[in-house]
Image (cartoon, grey):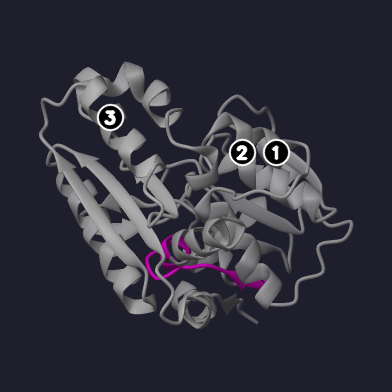
């Protein structure tokens, strides 16, 4: 029997409805700063603005020229920190090449009370010690989706493949908070299959197409694919979907999987920050 396919849109729609019910004519704003004209970033920003419109969040996009200085971006952040109509702020990454070395320095200027991405060290620290905080959107969306599927996390073996600050590390911390026994694996892990074969939940975020194959999981495992790779003009995940779905109990596809949850959780995080104001 093949796996139940978890289409992100179904869960994202429920999350958006929750936000919409909360907003209900409140003045809640999300500001996005984009520097330069990276095509992928432009698409992301447009999608975020569109999602905001759907739920009633006021979306503000601040477009700065490619050659902007660190100081110019920080000045915009400070203005938004002091704007009571803005509940959440994000700086669209990646920044242009000449600003990459200042990326963290720039992000650190966002007020922790408006850190909608959950990337600031103070929020990362809170997540790490199990305190209530706004956490990065993609792993938050994964947890929300599994909660909606009534997954019992208690005592489950969870393996996270990938150790990025955006997905891998926060994902591991969130699964720990849910009482899973968590193993983080990565490019230097030896005998990866040993860990994945014992896992009840496998979250893959390595950026390598079709990396996880059916011989690496046990029957009935829940497999969440966070990868987005382009192969021969098509989008594919980090999981070999066609083979793994025959062995897993639940699996997310790529496309139409976790991606929809990421933007929905951005709206949810904006709502959470507004509630705390």
What residue did someone put label 3 on? 75
Q: Quadrant of the N terminus?
A: bottom right
- Residue at image location 27% in from the left, 36% down from the top: 76
Q: Is residue 261 magenta?
A: yes
What residue did someone put label 1 on? 126
Mark closest to the chain's N terminus, 2 or 3: 3
- Magenta extent: 249-263
Mark closest to the chain's N terminus, 1 or 3: 3
Given residues 55 and 259, the one toward you in this image is: 55
Residue 110 visible in the snapshot? yes
Q: Which structural element holds mark 1?
A: helix
Q: Is residue 9 magenta?
A: no
Q: Which mark is in front, 1 or 3?
A: 3
Q: Which structural element holds mark 2?
A: helix
Label 2 neighbour load within 10 Å: few <14, some 14-19, many 20+: many
Q: Is residue 248 above or below residue 276?
A: below
Residue 198 visible in the snapshot? no
- Residue at image location 36% in from the left, 57% down from the top: 30
> Residue 188: horizontal and vertical position, in percent?
60, 24
What residue did someone put label 2 on? 123
Q: CA distance from mark 2 to mark 1?
A: 5 Å
Kindly check if marks 2 and 1 are in contact, taking CB atoms under 8 A apart as contact.
yes
> Residue 220: horizontal and vertical position, in percent?
73, 69
Label 1 neighbour load within 10 Å: few <14, some 14-19, many 20+: some
Q: Which mark is in front, 2 or 3?
A: 3
Given residues 214 and 22, the one toward you in this image is: 22
């Amino acid at each position: 029997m093949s796996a139940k396919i978890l289409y992100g849109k179904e869960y994202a729609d429920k999350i958006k409805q929750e936000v919409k019910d909360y907003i209900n004519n409140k003045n809640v704003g999300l500001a996005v700063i984009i520097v330069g004209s990276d095509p992928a970033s432009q698409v992301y920003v447009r999608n975020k603005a569109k999602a905001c419109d759907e739920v009633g969040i006021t979306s503000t996009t601040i477009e700065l020229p490619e050659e902007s200085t660190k100081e110019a971006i920080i000045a915009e952040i400070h203005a938004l920190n002091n704007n009571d109509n803005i509940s959440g702020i994000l700086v669209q990454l990646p920044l242009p090449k000449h600003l990459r070395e200042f990326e963290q320095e720039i992000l650190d200027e966002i007020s922790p009370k408006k850190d909608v991405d959950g990337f600031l060290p103070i929020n990362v620290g809170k997540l790490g010690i199990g305190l209530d905080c706004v956490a990065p959107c993609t792993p938050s969306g994964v947890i929300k989706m599994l909660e909606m599927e009534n997954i019992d996390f208690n005592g489950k073996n969870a393996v996270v493949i990938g150790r990025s600050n955006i997905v891998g590390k926060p994902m591991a911390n969130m699964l720990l908070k849910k009482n899973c026994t968590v193993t983080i694996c990565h490019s230097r892990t030896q005998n990866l299959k040993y860990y994945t074969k014992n896992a009840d939940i496998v979250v893959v975020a390595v950026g390598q197409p079709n990396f996880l194959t059916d011989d690496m999981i046990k029957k009935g495992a829940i497999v969440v694919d966070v990868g987005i790779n382009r192969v021969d003009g098509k989008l594919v995940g980090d999981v070999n979907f066609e083979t793994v779905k025959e062995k897993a109990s639940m699996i997310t596809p790529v496309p139409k999987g976790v991606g929809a949850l990421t933007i929905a959780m951005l709206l949810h995080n904006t709502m959470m920050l507004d509630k705390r104001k």
